[in-house]
Amino acid sequence: MLSVDFAGLILTVCLTGLRYPLCVLGAAVIHDLGAVLTALVFQGRVDSVIAAGAFGTASVSGVKAGVPAVMVALGGSLVNYLVGASFAGAAWEKNSRLLNPGAVLKQPFAVINLRLAVLSAIVALWQFI
């Protein structure tokens, strides 16, 4: 079952990229697909997915506790980080632009994926603990 949380998506847009909402939505889709694919890699059964950007979750059953459970919890963040690093756009940005969600960026998709990876990792670890 797929549920879309618009409040979480709007909050994610505000925290990661006000100037580039379509890039944020693309990064959110990558985040949710990454969470589902990570669950499938660890042979879990995906019961439901709540698409809420950085605040989205995937309810997975059949995954052993320990490292596989942590990897499933951080799967979306990991995929966002890999996509952001593969575009290599963060290396061309100033450090002040990397943190400012309203900044004009040269490579917005890469930077937004990195921002979303950090934000969703913090949220996932908070939910996991």
Image (spheres, grey):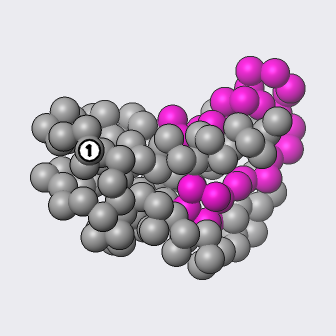
Secondary structure at numbered mark 1: helix
Residue farthest to the bottom, as pictured: 6
Q: In the image, 1: left or right of 100?
A: right
Which x, y percent locates residue 30? Answer: 46, 53
Magenta span contains residue 88: no
Task: Provide the residue span drawn in magenta.
Answer: 51-78
Residue farthest to the top, as pictured: 67
Q: Amino acid at mark 1?
A: Ser
Q: Which residue is mark 1?
A: 96
Which x, y percent locates residue 94? Answer: 18, 40
Which x, y percent locates residue 43? Answer: 74, 34
- Front residue of 45/94: it is 94
The residue positioned 70% from the left and 73% from the top of the image is 3
Task: Pick the quarter of the image with the C terminus.
Answer: top right
Is residue 10 at all visible to an observer of this figure? yes
The residue positioned 66% from the left and 47% from the top of the image is 123
For residue 4, above or below residue 111:
below
Which x, y percent locates residue 48? Answer: 76, 61
The residue positioned 72% from the left and 30% from the top of the image is 70
